Amino acid sequence: MRTLDERPTIPTDPSSMDIKRFISYLKENKIDQEEMNIPVSISNSITNRIQALSPIKALARVTLTTSDRLDVVVNSDEAEESGWVTNEIIRSDELASISKVSIHLHQLFAKPKVAHSLLEDHSIKVEEFIKDKITTQMAASENKSFLFGDGISQPKGILTYDISIQQAELGKIEGIVGGNIGAISDYSKIVELMEALPSKYLCGASWIMSRNAASHIRMIKDKTTQKFLWQNSIAHGVPDTLLGYPVVICDDMPKVSEEREGKCIPVLFANLFEGYHIAEKPSITILKDPYNSKPFIEFYATKRVGGDVVNFEAIKALVLN
């Protein structure tokens, strides 16, 4: 019979040990604690849940990086990037004109607060409570920044770019004037907006609007057939459609009466996977602060995220003025 010292050790799951250390960090009353990285399994869960809660992030292209900047190569003149190899010599002026967009990552924070009694209650999974709070707070901030961010301290928002209503212009989002501020009623302008998006981006395109804008568009009918453009879904989890393309409700989009700089942009028709690129670091750090929010305990969680438009041709906007 083997003695206790001779018995083989049972391997320990590293992720399980990380979670135990994380729980101890949340609960213990040590003074001057340093920040720690949230365990990978929990940070991945937060990242995935944020993507599900953020309509823009769910549609956009997302890249994980370990750097504070992601350089994205873009084709500035939309020249063809594929073809057939021949024996002819290709002149330099026939090559695609390319450039790059540098997406800088910015620090996003969340500050969930909990009561002392919650940390002391062994029947409550405090790590799940903190995770849920971080997720909802970060998701709300992220989604707003992807639309209205200044690009200096947060991602560059889609709706902060200039809108060109005359014709497509480099570095501007093409817009279709759909009426006056406060109402969407013109059938033809909705169709025109859809037709403005090049065919190569239609696979993966979506309508993006607030519930307020949706309530207006639901009432629009085809003047010839008198049928509603809006089609309600009959299956759970399947989005409603407008002119055959899915509608994504994003309450951070402006209401039809919400004016910004003399105009309102309540609706986008876009392929955001091609048009908007998000970069983020996978790690999330947390710091326990028992002093600044007494009688509560505050946790300061941070992650780094960036975003920018990389293809203006893949995004079209309905403009009210």
Image (cartoon, helix red, strand yellow):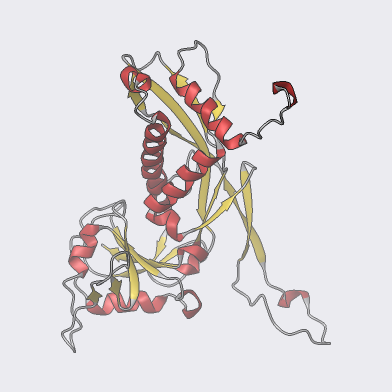
| Whether residue 234 is visible | yes
Write the residue at 30% across / 61% down: 209
Q: In which quarter of the image is residue 210?
A: bottom left
Q: Residue furthest top?
A: 31
Rendered location of residue 161, percent (x, y): 43, 55
**Residue situated in front as seen by the camera: 247 or 290:** 290
Task: Point out residue 264 in the picture as x, y percentages from the top left corner.
Answer: 28, 58
- Name the residue located 31 percent from the left edge and 14 percent from the top edge: 295
Nearest the eye: 259 or 54: 54
Q: Is residue 161 visible?
A: no
Image quarter hosting the N terminus? top right
- Indicate the quadrant where residue 245 lies: bottom left
Q: Which of 95 and 228 is in front in this view?
A: 228
Q: Eyeballing the image, is 44 above or below 11?
A: below
- Residue 227 location in percent, x, y? 18, 83
Percent position of residue 275, x then y: 50, 63
